[in-house]
Image (cartoon, rainbow, N blue to C red):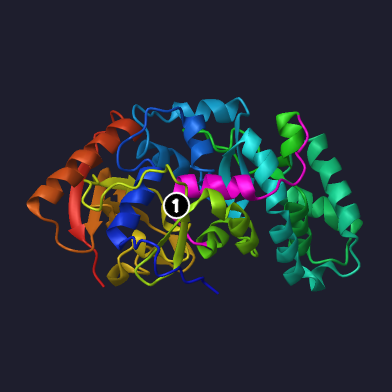
């Protein structure tokens, strides 16, 4: 249950929450930091597909080029691994070795739904066998599944592969994940790929503080949604003396770092082109700080997300690259001034991500 704040705590309106979150997310002004430092500050980038992390950083970093992320990934300083919310994230090597143990309990809970298909399977032994297989040589999930079936022929094949993914910190080895390169998903353990052991399960305190630095002000439930964890109330209470608190318009208690940026609600927020599955849209229980209520649900279809356009800090439309053009589809009519701002930002994004390809920019309107 979401906690209601004391009536004496200051209220932060939606626009104030929006600007604070955009500031933490490096979306008010592009930051002059390295791609690796940005991945660490943002506590990872959701990365079901290869390209979204690159677009995410292009929207956030001054002078970014795709090679700025590809290089540390090729050097094994950044990796792709299942962590938060049981989804693939791009993390620094340090975070891969600490965040994954932190969320292991959630991965264990995920396995409970596959108990029937794992009847008779010793999960500890499965983890040992799977580790030996992928550390001998990186393997595709299909190859791993077939090898595990040889050990447990009566088990459900999908359940076996899910068990391996849940019990082991499996990273996708390069060239998978590198900009402009192709490669199927092949897996080994984070420890083997990075050449150092995973760290002991950390106390969640530091991760709470990092979450607030990247996504705050936020409620306990917000953090739980972001991490895919439960029972974090005690952690926030332990940290309360060093935090400040606010209320959102509904009275929900929000925690924050005392010195974190909280720009005024009228601070300009330039347009930004965000990739599908950007964590800005996925890391709060109440997403109204970014997604206006009238547009709720319009950035998804089934379990697939669209690329989104921010205008004045809020989701205002979708975009795609199609037939040699950047197609911008606004939910509502844009003013001439807003249209010019979007055109300028789209031109900049294309120059960064697709130099020399000569994309046109077309405007349309999303219907329905």
Where 294 falls versus 257 (above or below)?
Answer: below
Q: Residue 33 appears in which quarter of the rendering?
A: top left
Q: Quadrant of residue 111?
A: bottom right
Determine if residue 215 is in view: yes
Q: Which residue is mark 1?
A: 216
Residue 361 in the image: state x and y as whole percent.
Answer: 20, 45
Q: Is residue 198 left or right of residue 300?
A: right
- Magenta highlight on residue 214: yes
Say whether residue 221 is left or right of residue 231. left
| Quarter containing the C terminus | bottom left
Q: Is residue 177 above or below residue 205?
A: above
Q: Quadrant of the N terminus?
A: bottom right
- The image quarter in which residue 324 lies: top left
Asked if one can make out residue 82 in the rendered structure from this viewpoint, the answer is: no
Q: Taking 349 as reference, is 182 left or right?
A: right
* Residue, far left: 336
Image location of residue 83, percent across then percent down: 63, 50
Residue at point 75% right, 47% down?
201
**Residue drawn at x 18%, y 39% as measured from the top left:** 344
Image mark count: 1
Q: Which residues are magenta?
A: 196-219
The residue under the point 23% across, 47% down is 267
**173 or 341, nearer to the observer:** 341
């Amino acid at each position: 249950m979401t906690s209601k704040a004391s009536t004496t705590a200051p209220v932060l309106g939606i626009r104030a929450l929006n600007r604070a979150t955009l500031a933490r997310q490096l979306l008010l002004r592009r930051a002059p930091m390295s791609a690796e430092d940005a991945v660490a500050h943002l506590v990872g980038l959701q990365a079901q597909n290869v390209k979204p992390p690159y677009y995410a950083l292009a929207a956030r970093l001054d002078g970014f080029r795709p090679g700025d992320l590809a290089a540390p990934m090729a050097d094994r300083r950044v990796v792709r691994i299942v962590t938060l919310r049981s989804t693939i994230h791009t993390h620094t090597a340090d975070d891969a070795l600490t965040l994954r143990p932190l969320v292991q309990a959630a991965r264990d809970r995920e396995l409970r739904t596959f108990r029937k298909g794992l009847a008779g399977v010793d999960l500890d032994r499965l983890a040992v066998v799977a580790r030996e297989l992928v550390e001998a040589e990186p393997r595709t999930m299909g190859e791993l599944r077939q090898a595990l079936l040889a050990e447990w022929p009566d088990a459900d094949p999908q359940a076996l592969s899910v068990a391996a993914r849940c019990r082991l910190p499996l990273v996708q080895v390069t060239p998978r994940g590198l900009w402009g390169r192709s490669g199927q998903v092949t897996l080994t353990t984070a420890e083997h790929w990075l050449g150092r052991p995973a760290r002991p399960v950390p106390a969640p305190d530091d991760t709470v503080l990092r979450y607030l630095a990247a996504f705050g002000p936020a409620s306990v439930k917000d953090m739980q949604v972001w991490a895919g964890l439960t029972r974090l109330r005690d952690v926030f209470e332990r940290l309360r003396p060093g935090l400040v608190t606010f209320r959102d318009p509904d009275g929900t208690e929000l925690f924050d770092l005392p010195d974190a940026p909280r720009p005024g609600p009228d601070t300009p927020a330039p347009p930004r082109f965000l990739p599908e599955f950007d964590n800005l849209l996925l890391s709060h229980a109440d997403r109204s700080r970014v997604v206006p209520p009238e547009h709720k649900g319009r950035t998804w279809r089934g379990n697939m997300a669209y690329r989104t356009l921010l205008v004045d800090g809020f989701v205002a439309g979708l975009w795609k690259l199609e037939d040699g053009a950047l197609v911008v589809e606004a939910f509502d009519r844009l003013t001439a001034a807003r249209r010019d701002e979007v055109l300028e930002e789209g031109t900049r994004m294309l120059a960064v991500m697709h130099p020399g390809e000569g994309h046109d920019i077309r405007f349309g309107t999303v219907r329905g």
